[in-house]
């Protein structure tokens, strides 16, 4: 079950001088229990890369096979095809508008995403804390949020668009409505999980509901909130794409939707890859943010 | 003002009765030491006095009227399982006290007041021997250090009633003695009422003005949790009784002799 | 409705409606609006159904749609609607396509992928009539138009009914056989620009501006000038294809470039007959409003003043 | 800020006899801090109902207003209209197929949902635990899962179809792919948050990686898994509807998309309400399940 | 077999040095009592022996070879903050030991073996005075009861090396004495090696065959965490020394006199 040769972390040199963190004697060549066998940096890079490599190879293989049968197959274009289509979008100004389509799309989409997720995060923070911390607010809002959570927003699209128009507001609202309820519930759950002792203690120190929220709940919930945002970004992209598919003139989702009818996978796949890249960068930034804001939640020595 | 009156207190969890017919009156400024077998309900009693839990029946009067059934700054607590705020360093944990006390809209004090608070916190940190750990988060503190931090935090709150649940259990004898001094000092200074649970009979006698023993008087071997514990012994200490090893031995013998599933006779260590 | 100055028109991408995008981008609309002392804002909505819904709910004063959808959605929804411009009818743009089978009759027993209750569905019904089959002889699988091309690529799918540009995408695949198309029922699938009747009555300027701008573009498109070619190139680009592709689509669209031809079509005797077929199709599929008890609930009036259905509830006017 | 009259829990009768849980003396009329003021059962029912009441009234008002202008307005139908449309679907056999449409749709959708969420739950459990518990698997799979988490599955639909066909498999896969990555990440996070002491202790008692998973990780993660499923049900319905919009002949999402073609909100709204009802019932069942499986995580006396 | 050899052990956290130059050899069957000021690194030392943490440098040999850097059934632990499995009742917590030991694919034993395990667990529950709490979850147990449960669980595991971190701190004198007896009994019976941290010097002398004092010898007032603690006193106890109050007073005086930010002289309480 274990990849052989990966347990090689015991091969550290035994020259470590005084004060170094490494043991000064070579460690025994023991085979640790699976859950204790740590992975070196290089090993992690290698292992983490494997699944991507596998997918890439599978794609190349399938694409080559399809293209061999039908050279103008659109479903699985070859990497050069995708690259040239992507480059076109990124560097060749659009004939009609003179814009560099990729960048215009990216800018528009990121703005919407930021606004939508921002609103949702704010709602999660304020409502989540209120619901989790104040029993009356919980009694008041939790049933409603629970129900709203399961209403598929896409089914109510017509009402949403008619109430809010087809502009940016509706799109941002769709994203916010799409991701906020889950976030609110999650944060509320976490607030309810705060140790009762800490809350009691804060009260004996003179904390009132408001100052406890500021000084106890907010900082303790922060790392979770960031995790929450990280988990919400996936659905947020989904709603963004859905919103842009209905009414807009630019945006990553709009472009994908537009070319989907023609099965232009040579545009769709690079766009999806680009979205993925953007999302991964966001995710990484959020992890950094969490470490910066809540160092206590990320001890230096992880288990 | 910080008088405590408990009358006919009873506490049940579902079917299990933990405390029953507990009656005790403590005048302001008294120092009550609570001893009793493990699991007999001492922490539960403290939690009720704190307002974190509510009695099942009976009256609890704190100060001028019935107890406010929620924790207030009037009553301070040190929990048995030391609890400090994990997201704050040792220093910040202490500064938080003044921040909370101010009750301001930002939950934080500024300017001169903050500088004062910082000085006070520094002094307190030094007194509990944590000056060098000022900037460590609780996760990096040893058990005893966390406990000292929790005590320091509670003392900084200057409650009228101080509830201590085995506060010194995780401390080495040296530091324990220092903490005894610190507590005695603050107690004489501020005249607060103290209720302390301890398993160290010596400590109970050394610090308290009164020693209370919790124990079960009724007993159902078939269903051990049918009856709860109550106060079986209430000893007022003056300078003479405090020193009397007779009383000490008596209390020591009482503690731990009525465990529900007792199988052998025990003596105090 | 009181007279007003600002109007909103929406359209969606389809070969016959591409001029709406062009006349908005090129400033022709603005010119005609100013000439009539009003403002007209033209919005493209990517999702066709959503554009009709928005119009029906009152979000827009006018919208591009087919005759069938005009009858079922706004008119069926009580919104009195006038077909202001009859732009074209489909003359091959909609088609029934079979995979590896060449005859329409082979469709019997198959699963047919199409956008249910759309003009494709109507086309299928008409096609089945011609080979004496009924809908119960096949299974209709509702398939979103955005996924039609991809769906055709899967082995589960053996027959589809759809419209252009999807038809040309699919027909380009080696296995595809077009077995029936709208050229065989000419004039029955009509692409319109409809406007709210009341708004139009109170604001005749709107009608003038829209019609004026539209036919200016029509003229431009037919003129053999560089401007005309440029206009068509832009429309081609906007619909995601090139000039050749766009021309190919135009070829299967009977555009009324000449207003007179449109008027002649409107006044023709075929139109009421078509609309009768359409409303029967809608009624039999339960789309004429849920409380529709007969085909006659929604009335239609024609250019000659004749009506079809409930004359007291005329909601669609040609 | 507090609803007056809601703090009335101190008005319990003082006749409580021996052994009752109520205090035998009337409680003081104190005004508790917001976070401590508990809400009585009736109060909770009342407060919890308020938002629904508010939405209902807002709807009735808006609907009446639109219907006054245009009696056959389709956007906001009146409750009787909706009720009769719903009743039709539930009780009158369809002319074409002879089915009771509502039940056929419900059955088809629930089956898909169950299968999709079931697969996702299984993946979350197995992958989540493996990633959270075994560093090597974490190094191997976490980067990949993180990336997959942010790829909008709707954009890759065409590939999904071609690979899996248009049948049930593709729909179930879409649902599973849509909700699984977030669940996997969430469970993995929770497993990593397990106290290191408990894991160390289990090892000293002879636990090996497998038995620790069985006896320590699985039971401790169970309540979270159920919460996870509860949170995932919202997105799952969304993906179900999206999947059914693509190619199908029955299902709740199919019906909604079909009648959206003629803005039949009198069908859509009851359908959405029906979905919501089903989802709320599922949610409630899951809470019961969690209490049954993990009584330790739901102490009798909540804070 | 269960010999422990520690040579030149050093442990740092970032800049802070907690332990340095720790050398100790314990033969199989010895009972080491560890005492020392709060925060000096006793728990850290135990965690290293457990394999939960790794030393920064130095050699640790357990049994026949270098320590396996992960917890194994060879070594049992009772943590300072009592940790039992919150999802299992008291009884289930004890049954888990046999389940884990069996290592079977279901993580559970069946039939006769389960019946035996149940009997053994019942007996152990009774010995630690928890028979009546058999079916309670840890959340419903008092602090002392949880601690007893943790001890019972660890003892059931029959480790060759037993690591105890202030195991009896939360217990009342009566139960504490019983637990002393229980531990001594099992120790004599199974001949395991025990390393116990305690703050109770009396307890250290009563139970141990050897008392080790951890303390800092070097000191930098500017940067208190520059130097770590080491073993400053190593006393082998035989029947004579065990009783000697001279040694006891000496150790008591050593503990708690070298706190990094020491401000006053202390004496043991
Ligand atoms: N993760 C960590 N990061 C930084 N410092 C740490 C960490 N863990 C422990 N320390 C430091 O190591 C020192 C020793 O801690 P340890 O818990 O071993 O003390 P101890 O002797 O068990 O004390 P006590 O008697 O109070 O339990 C403490 O000063 C503590 O601040
Ligand atoms: N939530 C609860 N549900 C059921 N029983 C409980 C609960 N909390 C406490 N108990 C029971 O109440 C009794 C008293 O517990 P408590 O913590 O007050 O004891 P204690 O005197 O503080 O003991 P120790 O000295 O060990 O800390 C115990 O027997 C415990 O099992
Ligand atoms: Mg207690
Ligand atoms: Mg320690």
Image (spheres, coloured by chain):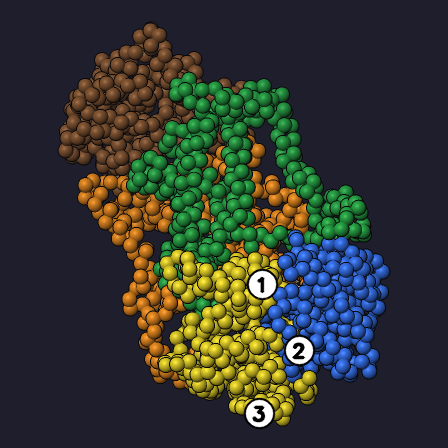
Chain colours: A green, B yellow, C brown, D orange, E blue
Name of the residue lying farthest toward the top: C224
Nearest to viewer (mark 3 / mark 2): 2
Q: Chain of mark 1?
A: B
Residue B241: image tag = 3
Q: Quadrant of ligand 1?
A: bottom right
Give me the residue at 65% from left, 82% from top.
E173
Mark 2 Cβ inside 8 Å of ligand 1: no
Who is closer to the viewer here, E89 or B23?
A: B23
Q: CA distance from mark 3 to mark 2?
A: 22 Å
On the question of residue E114 being in view, the answer is no
Q: Are marks 1 and 3 in contact (CB under 8 Å)?
A: no
Residue E268: image tag = 2
Q: What residue is disc 1 on?
A: B131
Where's the C terminus of chain C, which quadrant? Answer: top left
Which secondary structure lies at badge 2? loop
Who is closer to the viewer here, E248 or D65?
A: E248
Residue A4: image tag = none
Asked if badge 3 and badge 2 are on a common chain, one would say: no
Q: Chain of mark 3?
A: B
């Amino acid at each position: 079950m274990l990849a052989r040769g990966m347990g090689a972390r015991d091969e550290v040199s035994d020259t470590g001088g005084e004060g170094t963190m490494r043991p000064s004697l070579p460690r025994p060549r023991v085979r640790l229990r699976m859950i204790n066998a740590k992975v070196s940096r290089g090993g992690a890079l290698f292992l983490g890369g494997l699944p991507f490599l596998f997918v890439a190879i599978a794609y190349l293989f399938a694409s080559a096979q399809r293209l061999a049968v039908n050279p103008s197959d659109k479903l699985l274009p070859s990497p050069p095809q995708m690259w040239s289509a992507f480059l076109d979008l990124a560097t060749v100004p659009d004939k009609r508008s003179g814009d560099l389509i990729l960048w215009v799309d990216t800018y528009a989409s990121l703005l919407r995403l930021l606004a939508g997720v921002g609103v949702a995060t704010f709602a999660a923070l304020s409502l989540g804390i209120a619901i989790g911390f104040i029993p009356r607010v919980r009694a008041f809002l939790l049933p409603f949020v629970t129900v709203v959570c399961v209403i598929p927003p896409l089914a109510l699209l017509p009402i949403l668009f008619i109430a809010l128009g087809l502009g940016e507001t509706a799109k941002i609202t769709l994203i916010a409505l799409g991701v906020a309820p889950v976030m609110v519930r999650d944060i509320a759950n976490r607030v309810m999980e705060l140790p009762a002792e800490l809350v009691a203690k804060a009260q004996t120190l003179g904390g009132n509901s408001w100052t406890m929220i500021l000084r106890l709940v907010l900082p303790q919930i922060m790392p979770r909130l960031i995790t929450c945002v990280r988990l919400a970004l996936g659905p947020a992209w989904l709603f963004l794409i859905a919103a842009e598919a209905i009414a807009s003139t630019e945006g990553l989702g709009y472009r994908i939707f537009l070319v989907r009818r023609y099965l232009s996978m040579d545009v769709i796949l690079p766009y999806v890859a680009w979205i993925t890249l953007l999302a991964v960068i966001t995710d990484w930034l959020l992890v950094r943010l969490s470490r910066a804001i809540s160092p206590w939640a990320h001890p230096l020595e992880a288990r | 003002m910080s008088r405590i009156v408990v009358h006919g207190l009873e506490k049940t969890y579902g079917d299990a009765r933990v405390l029953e017919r507990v009656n005790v009156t403590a005048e302001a400024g008294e120092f009550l030491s609570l001893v009793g077998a493990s699991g007999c309900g001492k922490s539960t009693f403290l939690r009720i006095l704190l307002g974190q839990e509510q009695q099942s029946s009976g009256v609890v009067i704190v100060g001028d009227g019935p107890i406010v059934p929620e924790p207030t700054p009037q009553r301070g607590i040190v929990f048995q399982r030391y609890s400090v705020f994990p997201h704050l360093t040792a220093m910040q944990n202490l500064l938080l006290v003044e921040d909370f006390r101010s009750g301001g809209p930002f939950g934080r004090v500024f300017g001169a007041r903050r500088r004062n608070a910082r000085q006070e916190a520094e002094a307190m940190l030094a007194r509990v021997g944590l000056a060098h750990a000022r900037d460590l988060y609780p996760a990096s503190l040893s058990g005893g250090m966390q406990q000292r931090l929790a005590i320091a935090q509670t003392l900084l709150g200057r409650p009228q009633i101080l509830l201590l649940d085995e506060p010194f259990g995780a401390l080495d004898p040296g530091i324990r003695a220092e903490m005894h001094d610190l507590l005695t000092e603050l107690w004489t200074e501020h005249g607060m009422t103290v209720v302390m649970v301890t398993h160290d009979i010596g400590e109970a006698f050394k610090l308290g003005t009164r020693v209370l023993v919790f124990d079960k008087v009724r007993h159902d071997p078939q269903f051990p949790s049918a009856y709860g514990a109550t106060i079986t012994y209430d000893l007022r200490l003056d300078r003479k009784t405090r020193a009397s090893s007779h009383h000490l031995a008596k209390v020591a013998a009482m503690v731990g002799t009525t465990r529900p599933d007792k199988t052998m006779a025990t003596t105090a260590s | 409705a009181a007279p007003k100055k600002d109007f909103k028109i929406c359209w969606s991408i389809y070969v016959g409606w591409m001029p709406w995008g062009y006349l908005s981008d090129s400033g022709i609309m603005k010119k005609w609006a100013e000439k009539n002392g009003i403002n007209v804002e033209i919005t493209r909505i990517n999702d066709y159904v959503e554009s009709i819904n928005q119009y029906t709910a009152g979000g827009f004063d006018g919208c591009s749609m087919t005759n069938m959808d005009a009858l079922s959605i706004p008119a069926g929804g009580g919104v009195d609607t006038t077909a202001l411009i009859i732009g074209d009818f489909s003359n091959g743009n909609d088609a029934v396509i079979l995979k590896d089978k060449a005859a329409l009759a082979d469709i019997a027993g198959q699963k047919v992928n199409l956008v249910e209750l759309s003009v494709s569905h109507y086309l299928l019904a008409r096609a089945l009539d011609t080979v004496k089959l009924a809908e119960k002889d096949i299974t209709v699988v509702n398939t979103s138009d955005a996924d039609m091309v991809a769906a055709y690529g899967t082995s589960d799918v053996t027959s589809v009914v759809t419209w252009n540009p999807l038809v040309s995408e699919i027909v380009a695949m080696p296995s595809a056989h077009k077995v029936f198309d709208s050229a065989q029922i000419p004039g029955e699938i009509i692409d319109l620009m409809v406007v709210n009747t009341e708004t139009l009555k109170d604001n005749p300027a709107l009608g003038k501006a829209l019609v004026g701008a539209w036919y200016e573009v029509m003229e431009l498109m037919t003129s053999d000038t560089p401007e005309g070619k440029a206009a068509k190139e832009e429309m081609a680009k906007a619909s995601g294809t090139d000039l050749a592709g766009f021309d190919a689509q135009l070829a299967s669209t009977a555009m009324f470039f000449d207003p007179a031809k449109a008027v002649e079509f409107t006044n023709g005797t075929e139109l009421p007959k078509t609309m009768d077929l359409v409303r029967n199709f809608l009624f039999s599929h339960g789309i004429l409003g849920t409380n529709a008890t007969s085909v006659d609930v929604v009335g239609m009036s024609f250019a000659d003043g004749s009506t079809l259905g409930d004359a007291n509830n005329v909601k669609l006017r040609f």
